[in-house]
Amino acid sequence: MTFKQFVKRNESGREFSDLTNELVRTYLFANGFKLVIDDPIALHISKSGHYVVRADGVVTFVPYGANGFVALQFLTHGDAPSMNF
């Protein structure tokens, strides 16, 4: 699925940013856990956490809070800008 296809199907009312320049997005947690999300295409940042949509349509919610992430890493595709926000 592309970002444009996702936006057309999104009925949540949430606004999403395009992440198609990223190959992988990694969240690091205080307890040492690492969450790796391959092929992210869309991101919504809410008061409670991040919603990340993968190209295959899987949505991952990454919460803030005591057990929330402490760092975020991402790798962009080839010539895509490193920072797009």
Image (spheres, rainbow, N blue to C red):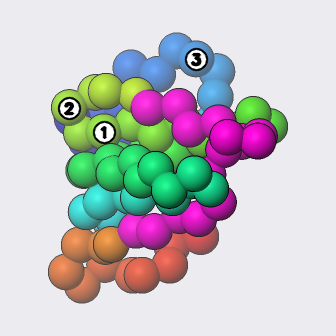
- Please indicate, yes or no, whether residue 66 appears anywhere in the rendered image: yes
Q: Residue at x 62, y 56 (%)?
A: 30
The amino acid pointed to by label 3 is: Ser
Identify the residue position indicated by label 3 in the image: 12
Assign a secondary structure to mark 3.
loop
The amino acid pointed to by label 1 is: Arg
Q: Residues within 10 Å of mark 1 (few under 14, many from 20)?
A: many
Q: Nearer the viewer, residue 49 or 67?
A: 67
Percent across and percent down for residue 21 are 33, 66
* Residue at far top of view: 11
Look at the magenta stretch and give its main secondary structure: strand
Q: Residue at x 46, y 22 (%)?
A: 10
Q: Quadrant of the N terminus?
A: top left
How far apart are labels 3 and 1 at the CA level? Answer: 16 Å
Percent across and percent down for residue 12 are 58, 17
Question: Do residues under tags 2 and 3 come within 8 Å of each other at their CB atoms?
Answer: no
In the rendered image of this protein, does residue 10 appear above or below residue 70?
above
Q: Which residues are magenta?
A: 60-74
Question: Do residues under tags 1 and 2 come within 8 Å of each other at their CB atoms?
Answer: yes
Identify the residue position indicated by label 1 in the image: 54
39 to the left or right of 8 = left
How far apart are labels 2 and 3 at the CA level? Answer: 18 Å
Residue 68 falls within the magenta-colored stretch: yes
Q: Earlier in the sequence, mark 2 or mark 3?
A: 3
Q: Nearer the viewer, residue 10 or 62?
A: 62
Q: Quadrant of the C terminus?
A: bottom right
Q: Earlier in the sequence, mark 3 or mark 1?
A: 3
Identify the residue position indicated by label 2 in the image: 56
**Which image quadrant is residue 75 in?**
bottom left
Percent across and percent down for residue 46 are 72, 37
